[in-house]
């Protein structure tokens, strides 16, 4: 910074900018609050159907979020400008003071351009006016003044440059819209960027030269700043994609980093997590540098890292994807390229177990679990489990096109779920483990439900769209075609069960055997009986039955659907007994037939689950029945927080203002009563301890389902002061009995697949 530029600077324009941004912050705060209350919250309570439920509602939610991001970004810009203005004014004042003190010693400071200046004598004694004796000074005074002015200019330059760097980085974060990066002042944002530069320099070092102390500094820094957008983008782009891969592969290579490994290998899992989280945050940036980073990383996927014998880029990067929320478009492009490499190396998938099989000489690329990390799909699928949109896109994408031996195109889902020969993995005890398939199940869960795996739907979860529903139908059909795909891979059941619990309206519709036809009056009645906001998964009745029986053979899968279905039944009873329900949304039958039909369809679902449970407890697997009770009871805490929204059903049930308004009211009362009885009855339903026959076990399940259906019907009738309060219990009993008879018929169709007798 030139001396005169600071000395004579007029800060009015900067002050005006600070003031203007202050007004913008205040106005955007009001707009953000209005958008949240007037748009977002209102949208969650509105009556959505069809395309509106899939597009408009989600768009409104994102728009409201943009207002909040705009306020956040404006606040950060205001903070940075305000800090910079205050500092520059302070440096201007310091400069004026230094120059004034210099004049008292007959020294003047002159700007010589391009950031340079001189300190010279102000008035030479020989040229002093008559009678005037200039103040004396020595060489120390000259040096001191020079150093003081130099420091002031250096600090002012740093203040000005850091503000420019931070503001540019902030604006570059998003190509469209606003960034949610939030900094209380310029110094904190600047510190993040500088720390990124320092840590990237450490990660660029040769692995064998990285000391344990430097490892600790890098690990601690990444942990602290992993969620910081400016830090993450700067770190990733400073390091670059090639060096990122070489760093992680290098420190895991015992030949390159033996000393570091001996000292810090027990902390490699933390570093893998922190590095992955940082890169995930960075991937959300739309800066030019980060866009290039993502493209180059994908291009390096099929190239060896660190020499021709090193692991492939996909193998290394996929292990860094096990933590964090990566950018959807990056994941989609990465997945397409990864599957192209899979086809090339495995002969269209026939030898995946050989192409990615861990060999004794291979470095251990994964430190966050028991698997080696050699199979790149394992880590990639874990990333998809946190990114629903990318997961839906990837799993529906073609793996093999139509032609040759394939009458239809083979999707990534079909290939991975049905055909792929997965590389063998074992834990440290030599036991077989299946991390890739387990992560696949979680990715499918995210892809079909629209929310990250392991979470429950919220009011913001969009209704199912066509692609999600299509994939869910494929899952049901695939498991029906070969139940062993699930029953012999029980670790998938928690995800599959959760998916099923969120498609209960679709499942109940399928059990009616009414063919989906928009021109059919019968189908219109089924749509009213089991309302769905969004796209409905078109499933075959027999497929649904076989699917549910397979899900029921695992405690976690069973419990998710069992609890969800009982709560869904309670919601439906409340919904259809509500006298305020508009006529065009009513099931066109008497209340008696309505209650019987709801009970019957719910009982068929419950009966199929009961067959699966019976098969697991009494069949060859000998699953402990106590595990079922425990799994059901585990839902109690979750259910208590979301009763009334359709636990495990989410937004697909909330299809009208009536249902939406009921979330905090009557529906909560009805659902709470039903689930309370379900949970209270868990302890007394240990089937093993009773020593019953399969027929007696079937009867025990039927009686418990009857009791719960009667509870739902009578509580709903009481809540709405229904004139049928004295009759609904019997209607529910009749319907449940019919439903269990239907399930029994379903079970007999699967007789060849089952070991136990179906009543």
Image: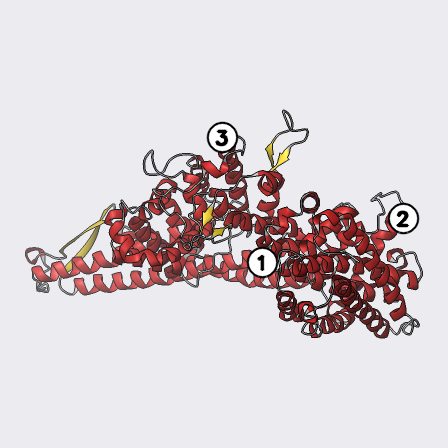
Q: Is residue 350 above or below residue 700?
A: above
Residues at circles 1 and 3 in contact by the CB criterion of under 8 Å? no
The C terminus appears in which quarter of the rendering? bottom right
At x 26%, y 55%, the residue is 154
In x, y percent, where is residue 386?
Answer: 55, 52
Q: CA distance from mark 1 to mark 3?
A: 33 Å
Secondary structure at badge 1 equals loop
At x 51%, y 42%, the residue is 422
Q: CA distance from mark 1 to mark 2?
A: 37 Å
In x, y percent, where is residue 99?
Answer: 21, 61
Q: Is residue 293 above or below residue 560?
A: above
Instruction: Single out the mark in the foreground, 2 or 3.
Output: 3
Q: Which residue is mark 1?
A: 454
Left-right relation of 643 to 15: right
Q: Earlier in the sequence, mark 2 or mark 3?
A: 3
Q: Which residue is mark 2?
A: 522
Please state which of residues 86 and 295 is positioned toward the viewer in this rendering. 295
Instruction: Single out the mark in the foreground, 1 or 3.
Output: 3
Secondary structure at badge 2 equals helix
Residue 584 seen in the figure: yes
Residue 459 seen in the figure: no
- Dot 1: within a 10 Å radius of its alpha carbon, few (fewer than 14), some, or many (20 or more) residues? some
Secondary structure at badge 3 equals helix
Q: Which residue is mark 3?
A: 344
Residues at circles 2 and 3 in contact by the CB criterion of under 8 Å? no
Q: Earlier in the sequence, mark 1 or mark 3?
A: 3
Please state which of residues 271 and 681 is positioned toward the viewer in this rendering. 681
């Amino acid at each position: 910074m030139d001396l005169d530029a600071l000395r004579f600077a007029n800060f009015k324009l900067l002050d005006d900018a600070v003031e203007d941004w202050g007004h913008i912050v205040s106005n955007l705060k009001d707009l953000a609050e209005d958008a949240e209350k007037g748009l977002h919250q209102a949208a969650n309570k509105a009556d959505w159907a069809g395309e509106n439920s899939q597009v408009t509602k989600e768009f409104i939610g994102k728009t409201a979020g943009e207002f909040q991001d705009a306020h956040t970004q404006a606040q950060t810009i205001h903070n940075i400008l305000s800090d910079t203005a205050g500092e520059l004014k302070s440096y201007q004042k310091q400069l004026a003071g230094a120059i004034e003190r210099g004049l008292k010693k007959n020294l003047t400071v002159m700007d010589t351009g391009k950031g340079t200046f001189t300190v010279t004598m102000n008035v030479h004694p020989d040229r002093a006016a008559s009678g005037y004796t200039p103040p004396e000074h020595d060489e120390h005074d000259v040096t001191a003044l020079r150093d003081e002015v130099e420091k002031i200019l250096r600090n002012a330059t740093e203040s000005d440059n850091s503000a420019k760097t931070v503001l540019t980085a902030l604006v570059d974060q998003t190509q469209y819209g606003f960034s949610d990066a939030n900094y209380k002042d310029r110094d904190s944002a600047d510190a993040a960027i500088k720390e990124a530069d320092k840590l990237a320099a450490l990660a660029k070092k040769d692995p064998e030269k990285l000391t344990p102390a430097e490892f600790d500094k890098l690990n601690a820094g990444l942990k602290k700043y992993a969620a910081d957008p400016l830090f993450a983008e700067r770190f990733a782009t400073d390091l670059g994609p090639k060096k990122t891969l070489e760093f992680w592969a290098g420190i895991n290579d015992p030949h390159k980093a033996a000393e570091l490994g001996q000292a810090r290998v027990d902390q490699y899992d933390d570093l893998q997590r922190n590095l992955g989280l940082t890169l995930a945050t960075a991937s959300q940036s739309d800066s030019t540098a980060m866009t290039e980073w993502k493209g180059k990383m994908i291009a390096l996927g099929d190239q060896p890292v660190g020499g021709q014998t090193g692991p492939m880029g996909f193998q290394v990067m996929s292990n860094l994807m096990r933590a964090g929320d990566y950018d959807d478009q990056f994941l989609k492009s990465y997945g397409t390229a990864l599957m192209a490499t899979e086809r090339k190396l495995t002969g269209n998938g026939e030898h995946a177990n050989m192409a990615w099989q861990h060999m004794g000489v291979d470095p251990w690329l994964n430190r966050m679990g028991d698997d080696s990390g050699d199979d790149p799909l394992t880590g990639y699928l874990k990333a998809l489990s946190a990114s629903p949109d990318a997961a839906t896109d990837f799993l529906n994408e073609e793996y093999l096109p139509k032609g040759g031996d394939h009458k239809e195109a083979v999707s990534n889902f079909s290939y991975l779920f049905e055909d792929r020969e997965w590389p063998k993995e074992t834990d440290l005890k030599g036991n077989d483990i299946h991390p890739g398939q387990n992560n696949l199940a979680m990715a499918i869960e995210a892809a079909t439900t629209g929310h990250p795996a392991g979470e429950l739907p919220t009011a913001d979860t969009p209704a199912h769209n066509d692609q999600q529903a299509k994939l869910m139908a494929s899952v049901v059909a695939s498991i029906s075609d070969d139940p062993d795909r699930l029953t012999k891979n029980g670790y998938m059941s928690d995800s599959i069960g959760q998916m099923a619990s969120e498609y209960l309206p679709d499942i109940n519709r399928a059990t009616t055997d009414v063919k989906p036809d928009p021109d059919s009056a019968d189908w219109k009645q089924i749509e009213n009986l089991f309302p769905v906001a969004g796209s409905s998964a078109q499933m075959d009745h027999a497929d649904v039955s076989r699917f549910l029986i397979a899900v029921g053979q695992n405690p976690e899968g069973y419990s998710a659907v069992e609890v969800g279905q009982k709560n869904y039944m309670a919601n439906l009873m409340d919904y259809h007994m509500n006298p305020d329900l508009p006529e065009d949304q009513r099931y066109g039958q008497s209340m008696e037939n309505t209650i019987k039909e709801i009970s019957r369809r719910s009982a068929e679902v419950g009966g199929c689950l009961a067959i699966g449970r019976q098969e697991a407890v009494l069949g060859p697997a000998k699953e402990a029945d106590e595990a079922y009770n425990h799994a059901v009871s585990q839902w109690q805490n979750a259910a208590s927080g979301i009763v009334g929204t359709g636990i495990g059903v989410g937004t697909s049930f909330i299809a009208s203002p009536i249902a939406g308004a009921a979330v905090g009211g009557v529906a909560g009362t009805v659902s709470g009563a039903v689930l309370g009885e379900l949970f209270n009855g868990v302890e007394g339903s240990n089937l093993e301890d009773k020593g019953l026959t399969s027929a007696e076990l079937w009867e025990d399940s039927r009686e418990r389902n009857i009791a719960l259906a009667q509870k739902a019907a009578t509580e709903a009738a009481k809540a709405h002061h229904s004139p049928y309060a004295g009759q609904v219990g019997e209607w529910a009993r009749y319907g449940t009995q019919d439903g269990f008879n239907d399930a029994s018929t379903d079970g007999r169709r699967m007789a060849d697949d089952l070991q136990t007798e179906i009543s």
